[in-house]
Amino acid sequence: LEASGGRAGPGIATLRLDPSYRPSVVDGLVSGLHVPGESHYELLRAFASHARLSRALAVAAGAGMSGHELGDACLIVPQH
């Protein structure tokens, strides 16, 4: 948690991962696919642009993949 000073213990996380967040420790994540307007989609936007996520969603749908928490997973990494 951000407020813990790096110590384990109870607390409330205040960090929000969205398009304005710039990851500094990880380069990507494994996630299910989500659609625009969902909070999980905003988290994915910290790692990939709307255009890139839209293309990924279209390809996945065309391949018959499922989305959301119980669906197929994909690796999302920033384009350098």
Image (cartoon, rainbow, N blue to C red):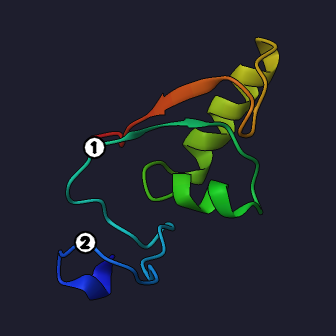
Q: Is residue 64 above or below residue 50?
A: above
Q: Amino acid at mark 1?
A: Asp
Cα separation, mark 1 vs mark 2, equals 24 Å
Task: Name the residue rendered at 68%, 41% in the picture.
Answer: 54
**Residue sticking out furthest to the front:** 9
**Residue projecting furthest to the top:** 63
Examine the rendered structure and indicate whether residue 8 appears above or below residue 54. below
Estimate the x, y position of residue 6 in percent, counting from the top left: 17, 75
Name the residue tied to disc 1.
Answer: 27
Marks 1 and 2, the one that precedes in the sequence: 2
Figure quadrant of the C terminus: top left
Does residue 13 appear left or right of residue 22 in this picture?
right
Q: Position of residue 8 (x, y in %)?
A: 25, 71
Does 72 sit left or right of 35 as displayed? left
Residue 72 in picture, x, y percent from top left: 67, 23
Q: Residues within 10 Å of mark 2 (few under 14, many from 20)?
A: few
Q: Which quadrant would residue 24 be assigned to in this image? A: bottom left
- Return the residue at label 2: 8
Amino acid type at image mark 2 = Ala
Is disc 1 placed on a helix, strand or loop? loop
Residue at figure coordinates x 19%, y 76% from the top left: 7
**Front label number (1 vs 2):** 2
- Give percent across and percent down for residue 77: 38, 37
Task: Sort mark 1 into few (<14), some (14-19) or many (20+) by Cα contacts within 10 Å.
Answer: few
Q: Quadrant of the N terminus?
A: bottom left
Residue 7: mark in rendering? none
Picture quarter containing residue 33? top right
Q: Is residue 69 left or right of residue 48?
A: right
